[in-house]
Amino acid sequence: MADVARAAGISTALVSIVIRGVPGASEATRQRVLRIADELGYVPDQRAQKLRQSRSRVLGVTFELQQPFHGDLVEKIYAAAGQHGYEAMISAVAPSRSETTAVNALLRERCEAAILLGSELETDELTRLARRLPTLLVARHTDLPGVGVVRSDDTAGIGLAVDHLVALGHRRIAHIDGAGAPGSSDRRLGFLQAMAGHGLQDTADVLAGGLTETAGAEGMRYLLGRPVPPTAVIAFNDRCASGVLDVLARQGCDVPGEISVVGYDDSRLAKLPHVQMTTVSQNAAELAEAAVTHALALIAGRQPEEVVLTPRLVERATTGPVRP
Amino acid sequence: MADVARAAGISTALVSIVIRGVPGASEATRQRVLRIADELGYVPDQRAQKLRQSRSRVLGVTFELQQPFHGDLVEKIYAAAGQHGYEAMISAVAPSRSETTAVNALLRERCEAAILLGSELETDELTRLARRLPTLLVARHTDLPGVGVVRSDDTAGIGLAVDHLVALGHRRIAHIDGAGAPGSSDRRLGFLQAMAGHGLQDTADVLAGGLTETAGAEGMRYLLGRPVPPTAVIAFNDRCASGVLDVLARQGCDVPGEISVVGYDDSRLAKLPHVQMTTVSQNAAELAEAAVTHALALIAGRQPEEVVLTPRLVERATTGPVRP
DNA sequence: CTCCCGGACTAGAACGTACTAGTTGATCTC
DNA sequence: GAGATCAACTAGTACGTTCTAGTCCGGGAG
């Protein structure tokens, strides 16, 4: 910046004014400074900027590197944050990189708030984090005071899937759940409630699953081994449903002729033209927008609340009427 | 930091010494400062640290949010960077977030080097970037001076796949390529060369594809429509191969009984227990380690070079002898 | 007893920016 | 023509660290 000022024969303060685009410089100098800055390849040092401003204008986001739905969310969060004059700083979670590591990286960056996607953080760690910084959980339930939540109504979402299948004539419906994953118990509950609502509590079948294709595949193989397999399967998420579909395809089982399959998330996987998965949409864009808005509200000092969005069923090609 | 110093009744300089763990403080104060810092929840402000030190010790990484292989690489880069005392700062590329945006975000963070995974940046933009900052391309070819390259030998990699299939008796082999994607032309060339090497230039079939499941699925459907379909397919990457496998499963086509399929990358997708895809491994860990090492060499002022790793064929369950 | 040495600690200047509180000179107003 | 007003610009401080160049004090050597 000093170089630019020297080259233009003005003070650094004026360069700063031009670079930030705030009023206080003549049109002539403005042009000249911008030209010189470009020639010198000057890019403002973000660290110094943030350091000077009391507010960093950065939202920290942790996400799971290999979850397509998280990828969708991250993309939308970038956009939503940008629209509100904020920047998103992402920190990945992976088998070899714990959530604690990811969160600490954000902390050191002095984010104004932390948005945790599908966090599996322990209660005490979460409490500690929330004491330091406005914290927002996306797609996970918690009763912890001081922690904001943005999620869609998982119980209702699975209900939509059940209603849809029952309307198609299905009665023997299985649910491959998410084991201990966030949202898993809500979805399991929603499944059982909805089935009971249709008087189908006796044919409701819940299987321990997981968030990966592998979990779905194992679950489906197990179900096919049953004396009387279900006619429809609701998976915990799209990845899990992918595994289910894959096993069915290999077994030569017609989908949806013999077995209907419903996923969850409406992630990239469900939208693939050759998959066309019926799924429950959490609407990544809406979720991301709500998360950013709520995070900003927390930063502004508002009390954390629980924002619950209504999911929507997206009917595609993996569900159909039960075969008579 | 000032709070900690006040609470401990010492200067901020001494707190700094303790926090950084450098010699210059008595054991007693060291303990006390650490305890107080912990109580107050003090975390050093990374921006101020980096600002003060001339070196930021940050490696910038751009990656594609929805490419499982990039996910694998990012995970390994985090680890490799950490081992060398560096930190990785990731910036995602997605349909709604261009590579230019991603790179600019890194620039403003004053990374010491940029590692671009599978970049599709234009030549002039790349040149401009490389002038500002040590730049390293991973899994992409370039002749640009001043730009480092770490990649595996794509031509040889596809050669391995061809050799493997030919050894199994296949003669009609198709390659669904990556269209304009980085590495695509090398792999196409490798395919044609290897086929010609076996005297099979007349049955070598190259199809325009892409990097997604959709591209693979479309390509495979097209191939199945042929009067004489190939007995084996080599896809541009694992995602593409996934689409191929999916279409085959739906058509009730036995893999590898009727058609063998080979992917590329050995990403998460290929390793799924129910998929067990034969694929060419670029060895994410090795590639990541080489990328970080080379990036550090560039930072140290060494000239950029092209590091070419040798790929390896991972035989799993999607390839088998051609049916007589 | 004096001198020196080394360990423990501190004052204060950087790092690159933003921002407050100015200064300057020209134009406007009556 | 004097004062007010305004646009255009600048000096200098602050942000939270690190780091250089010290200060201070106790004890061992001569």
Image (cartoon, coloured by chain):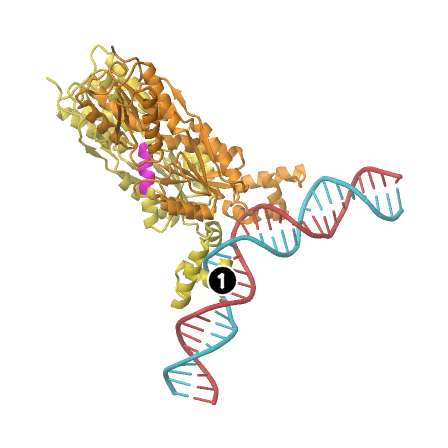
Chain colours: A orange, B yellow, C red, D cyan
Q: Position of residue A216 (x, y in %)?
A: 26, 28
Q: Can residue B159 be spotted in the picture? A: no
Direction from residue C6 to residue A53 in the image, left or right: right
**Percent position of residue A223, x then y:** 21, 24
- Residue D28 is situated, as x and y percent measured from the top left of the image, at 37, 82
Q: Residue at x 46, y 33 (%)?
A: A77
Number of marks in the image?
1
Note whether B177 is above or below B146 in the view shown.
above
In the rendered image, which residue does mark 1 sit on?
B7
**Label 1, residues with CA under 10 Å away: few <14, some 14-19, many ≥20:** some
Indicate whether residue B69 is drawn in magenta. Answer: yes
Disc 1 secondary structure class: helix
Q: Position of residue B208 (x, y in %)?
A: 31, 20
Amino acid type indicated by mark 1: Ala
**Which residue occupies 29% across, 30% down?**
A177
Whether residue A218 is visible here, answered yes or no, is yes
Disc 1 sits on a residue from what chain?
A: B
Left or right: B146 as drawn, with respect to B217? right
- The answer to whether residue A46 is magenta is no
- Residue in the picture at 42% in, 40% down: A143
Q: Is residue B14 above or below residue B177?
A: below
> As rendered, which of A324 and C19 lies closer to the eye?
A324
Q: Which portion, as a residue range, is magenta?
A: B68-76
- Tell me if B294 is positioned left or right of A106 in this view: left
Magenta region, main secondary structure:
helix
Q: Nearer the viewer, residue A57 or B301?
A: A57
Q: Is residue B187 left or right of residue B145?
A: left
> Which quadrant holds the C terminus of chain B?
top left
